[in-house]
Amino acid sequence: MLTPGEGPIDCSKCLAKMVIFAAEIARQDFPDRVRGYIGLAENLVPPQSLTWTYHDLEREVRWYIKRVGAEGSRFA
């Protein structure tokens, strides 16, 4: 039996990361939309105990933005 986070059902994890990324982008220019994005991302995380949580995904997305932002600044 497949569970979220393993195999084809893992799409909810990727989609949640994308929505968290959208929330981070919206935070500055569209602050009224951030709560909606966060709510959607939280709903994509299954209620069962998994190897990843919403906060794990949020931390990963923020790390990625920080890292890519730092690397991108070298080329500006």
Image (tube, helix red, strand yellow):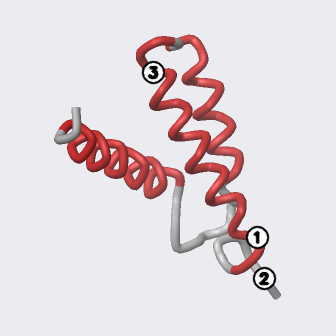
Q: Position of residue 52 (x, y in %)?
A: 52, 66
Which residue bears the numbered disc 3?
27
User: Does 14 sit above or below residue 1?
Assistant: above
Alpha carbon of mark 2 to alpha carbon of mark 3: how far? 35 Å
Q: Earlier in the sequence, mark 2 or mark 3?
A: 2
Q: Position of residue 28 (x, y in %)?
A: 41, 16
* Residue nearer the viewer, 10 or 67: 67
User: Does 61 sit above or below residue 13?
Assistant: above
Q: Amino acid at mark 3?
A: Arg
Query: Can you tell which quarter of the image residue 8 is in?
Result: bottom right
Q: Earlier in the sequence, mark 3 or mark 1?
A: 1
Q: Position of residue 12 (x, y in %)?
A: 70, 58
Query: Can you tell which quarter of the image residue 74 is in?
Result: top left
Q: Which mark is residue 17?
A: none
Element marked by disc 1: helix
Q: Please identify the residue farthest to the bottom as the structure is shown.
A: 1
Which residue bears the numbered disc 2?
2
Q: Amino acid at mark 2?
A: Leu
Left or right side of 60 for 69: left
Q: Amino acid at mark 1?
A: Ile
Name the residue at 22% across, 39% down: 75
Alpha carbon of mark 1 to alpha carbon of mark 2: how far? 7 Å
User: Does 35 sit above or below residue 22?
Assistant: above
Circles 1 and 2 in contact, beta carbons < 8 Å: yes
Quadrant occupied by the C terminus: top left
User: Counting other residues with Cα less than 10 Å from the Cα at mark 2, is it few (<14), some (14-19), or many (20 or more)?
Assistant: few
Q: Earlier in the sequence, mark 1 or mark 2?
A: 2
Quadrant occupied by the N terminus: bottom right
Which residue bears the numbered disc 1?
9
